[in-house]
Image: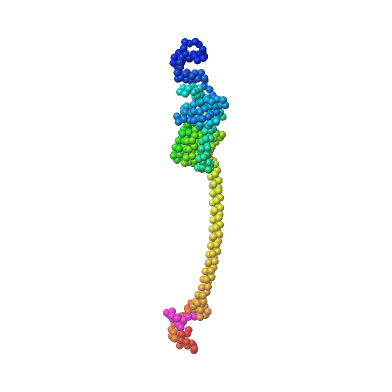
Amino acid sequence: MSERSAPGGGNLDLFRDRAAPAPRVWTVSQVNRAVRLMLEQTLPQMWVTGEVANFSRHRSGHCYFTLKDSAAQLRCVMFRREARALPTDPEDGMTLRVFGGLTLYEARGGYQFVVTRLEAEQTEGMWKLAFDRLRRKLDAEGLTDPARRRPLPEFPRLVGVVTSPGSAALRDIVAVTARRAPWLRLLVRGTGVQGRGSGAGIAAAITTLARRGVDLIVVARGGGSIEDLWGFNEEPVARAVSECPVPVVSGVGHETDVTICDLVADLRAATPSAAAEAVAPDRKALARRLDGLRQRLGKTLAAQARGRRWRLDAGGSRLSEAVRRLVRHKAGRLAAAAAAMEALSPLSTLARGYAVPLDPEGRLLRTTRDFAPERGFRLRVVDGSVPCVATGAPERQPGMAESGR
């Protein structure tokens, strides 16, 4: 082993036995510093696996825990900068793999492993743990209940889109909506959608679009690893989706990718293209639907017209019959009245052979006294009058009263 310089000067060789006039006296600090340098410079960084115990996150952001196996244990520290990348804190008893290097904490004289990367032994174990923890929390609040899901508007006019500007997801959404519903307008709010920490930007974009009068919002991203999609698994996104006043469609990743955003959204689409198809009505299908409605409307109107025509015809027939009955009734009454009047008419008497004498002024001559000799009068018969002259003295009929005819 090569010689090393001691912190206080001179050479450090702890392993070579050689004669010396007098041993050097070291301070505790010098010893601990020398050991720290030896550990850091001699042992390379490495992967270590073990079962985690006593994991704690200090208010400073540093994490402290112990890795152990059946025979030994190793104290570990993960400083704030690296600890911020953890999706969640591991549970005691989990088997972890950590990468880092050994050092010595000089103040205590204890060596520890400085962790720069931490993984669960199972693939995606830490991410799944964080996912399950948040899902249980949201389940308990009822935010993943299917009964909360709202129906999408059938004919939206303005759709908000949350995705990365210039991404393939955005191009797919634009292409699908242009083909299916050219009249549909898109309002895009670009934001980072990659990796941990992007959740805050996604949540802010959803909140902003909700205030812009959109009919619904599509949150979209293409596929990727669970770490790539992690922004959609963060609690701020779940809160923004659940509190959004308009329906939200989640089109994140591929069909096999499930995110917290999917679980809270009103509709989960397998891909961004599928999300666009879900919100954009197909104009060809609409044309077929309108044609069907037109035919149904025509048939309905024709049936209604036939029904009304039948009712009008039936009503007209009933009215005509009622009028005929009324006319017959009135005609009968009129005939009876006419007969009664005819019976009382003087013309009827004249028709039976009687005649009525009238003086030149048209006054009725009732008695023989009314006929002066040689005086003219007219005799009214049924079909006219005859001029007459009384000749001689009138002859009175015995037994007739003065008022008789």
Residue nearest the viewer, comparing 72 with 188 = 72
Q: Position of residue 227 (x, y in %)?
A: 52, 30
The answer to whether 254 appears left or right of 371 in the picture is right
Instruction: State how many labels appear.
Output: 0
Q: Magenta segment, principal secondary structure?
A: loop
Is residue 212 depicted above or below 300 in this figure?
above
Query: Residue shown at 44%/16% (left/top)?
Result: 8
In reply to whether residue 360 is colored magenta, the answer given is yes
In reply to whether residue 32 is colored magenta, the answer given is no
Q: How is the image coloured?
A: rainbow
Q: Residue furthest left?
A: 361
Q: In the rendered image, is residue 269 in sight?
A: yes
Q: In which quadrant of the rendered view does residue 271 lie?
A: top right
Residue nearest the viewer, comparing 144 with 164 = 144
Q: Residue furthest bottom?
A: 398
Magenta-highlighted residues? 355-366
Query: Residue shown at 47%/41% (left/top)?
Result: 245
Q: Position of residue 55 (x, y in %)?
A: 51, 30
